Amino acid sequence: MKRRVMFLCSGNSARSQMAEGWLRHLAGNQYEVVSAGTEPSAVNPLAIAAMNERGIDISTHTSKPLARFLGESFQVLITVCDNAREKCPIFPGVLKRIHWPLEDPVAARGSDDERLAAFWRIRDEIETRVRAWLNEQP
C-alpha cells in the first residue's frame, strides 16, 4: 500500500504545487501525493514555468481546498507556510506532521525576471527538502 502525503499551504498556488510535483517526479509511484490550500486560488503560471525548466509539468494541477480531504487518512502532512500550519485543522488520520517554513514566491515584487527568480529559488529549496525527506524514509 502506498503511503499518502499531503502538501499544504494557504493558496495551493505555488509552494505546495511545486512540492507535489517534486515528490511525484523523484519518488515515482512510491507515494500517493496531493496538495491543498486553506484558501485555494489557482496554480500560479510562474510556478508552472519554474517547474517546466526542470522538466516537471504541473500545468494540469488544480488548486484544491483542504476541506476536500477532511476525513481521509495521510501518513504525512507537510505544511509549507506558517499560515497553513496555524490554520490547519487536526487530521485524525495523519500519522506525522512536518513543517517547512518556505518564503512565498507569489509575494515577490519587481520585474518579471525578478519575480521568476523568486520562484526558482523556492523551487530549488523545495527540491532540496524533498530529496532530504526521501533519504530519511525507510
Image (cartoon, rainbow, N blue to C red):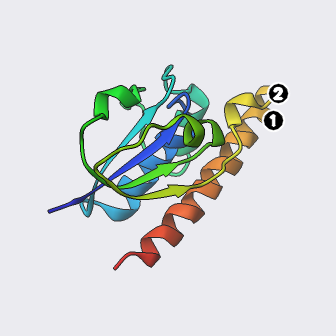
Query: Are dots 2 and 1 in contact, CB under 8 Å?
Result: yes
- Please give left or right for residue 63 compared with residue 98 in the image: left
Give the residue drawn at x 47%, y 31%: 37
For mark 1, does the 10 Å Cα neighbourhood hold few (<14), some (14 to 19), or many (20 or more) residues?
few
Residue 118, image x, y percentages? 74, 41
Q: Which residue is mark 2?
A: 109
Q: Earlier in the sequence, mark 2 or mark 1?
A: 2
- Determine whether 129 is above or below 8 in the image: below
- Please give left or right for residue 92 compared with residue 101 in the image: left
Work out whether residue 92 or residue 117 is closer to the camera in this orientation and state it.
92
Q: Which of labels 2 and 1 is toward the front?
A: 2
Residue 48, image x, y percentages? 52, 34
Q: Which residue reaches farthest right? A: 110
**Distance in Å between CA atoms under marks 2 and 1:** 7 Å
Q: Which residue is mark 1?
A: 114
Give the residue drawn at x 75%, y 42%: 117
- Determine whether 65 is above or below 32 in the image: above
* Quarter of the image with the N terminus in it: bottom left
Residue 110, image x, y percentages? 85, 27
Q: Secondary structure at mark 1?
A: helix
Res 37 visible: yes
Give the residue drawn at x 57%, y 46%: 80
